[in-house]
Image (cartoon, helix red, strand yellow):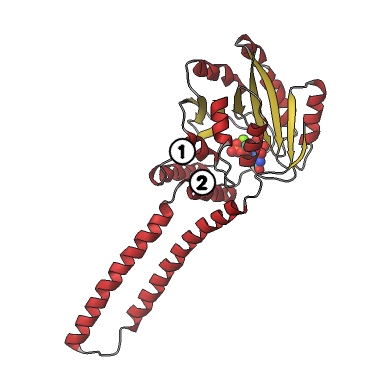
Amino acid sequence: MKLLSVVVPCYNEEENVPYFYEELLKQEDKLKERGIGLEIIYIDDGSKDGTVREVRKLREKDERVHLVSFSRNFGKEAAIYAGLSKAKGDYAVMMDADLQDPPALLPEMFDYIDQGYDSVATRRVTRKGEPPIRSFFARRFYALMKHISKTEIVDGARDYRLMTRQVVDAILSMKEYNRFTKGIFGWVGFQTKWLEYENIERVKGETKWNFWKLLLYSLDGIMAFSTMPLAIASVLGIVFCIFAFLLIIFIVVKTLIYGDPVGGWPSLVCIISLVSGVQLFCLGIVGQYMSKMYMEVKNRPIYLVKEEF
Ligand code: UDP
Ligand code: MG
């Protein structure tokens, strides 16, 4: 019998914890036929509601239920890392507690593992039920990432992914503090099969993401998997140097021919303010990378555990 570890990050999901359990167990027989047993690892990401209480209740009747409870909210990326570290399975799968990742897909996913794929990932082909403005910016983000990052980051990719032990270990070997999971999966590589499905709206509770959080998250993603902004800063620097050089020649020649009538300060003000704006912009980009580096160098733990079973 092989073991499948199901990793479920939960942040204020008390209603979904038992519901998810029931839905998952509906697939138990089908998995058993393939010789696969289950363990369920709930990660409580510093929930303020009864998430931990609900997991404890499940544990009382089922030994295969596990919990890692964080001391505060560390974010889904940290929760995924904690879950994969705790997973003992020959395979691991990550699923949202809100059942937006249908467990019914699991048997099909194992078909592909049997065919020799190392990992089976899912992507949404529609964004039904999402605010249009959010979809628009999400699309722009993926289009941009395609151009500026060498790592493959797939549009609409969910974190719902089945992996062999080998892939799990590869992901665990990446101990960086700024964890952009979608990029990390792309970075480790391996043979990945993509399954597509239509977006499913969450059953209970509310999404934990608002527009601002997503915007910051996308900036993290760009910083973590592309150094293109640094290149842009350098190119801007070069362009402005060339411009300045030409301007110097022009002004010297002009002064030699026509003398130096006072004037021209409006253009001077324009040039100074434009150039200093660009300078600050580029300095900001460099500063962003430096702040990320600062956080990495501190080498803080990715998460802190309060309770575990
Ligand atoms: N989640 C988490 N920590 C957070 C935010 C979210 O563990 O800080 C979990 C959440 O409980 C859920 C999953 O990550 O199981 C996906 O979150 P959500 O459904 O809010 O995101 P969406 O599906 O809207 O992208
Ligand atoms: Mg969700």
Q: State whether residue 160 appears in this view.
A: no
- Which quarter of the image is occupied by the C terminus? top right
Q: Is residue 41 left or right of residue 161?
A: right
Quarter of the rendering containing residue 25: top right
**Residue topped by disc 2:** 221
Instruction: Kindly identify the amino acid type of the residue bearing the numbered disc 1.
Output: Ile
Q: Are marks 1 and 2 in contact (CB under 8 Å)?
A: yes
Distance CA(mark 1)–CA(mark 2):
10 Å
Q: Is residue 223 left or right of residue 49?
A: left
**Residue at position x 72%, y 26% in the image:** 19
**Residue at position x 50%, y 47% in the image:** 224
Quarter of the rendering containing residue 42: top right
Q: Percent from the top left, x then y, of residue 259?
A: 21, 89
Q: Earlier in the sequence, mark 1 or mark 2?
A: 1
At label 1, counting other C-alpha atoms closer than 10 Å, the crowd grade (few under 14, some 14-19, many 20 or more) is: many
**Residue at position x 64%, y 28% in the image:** 99
- Which quarter of the image is occupied by the N terminus? top right
Q: In the displayed image of the protein, which residue is found farthest to the left?
A: 257
Instruction: Kindly identify the amino acid type of the residue bearing the numbered disc 2.
Output: Gly
**Residue topped by disc 1:** 153
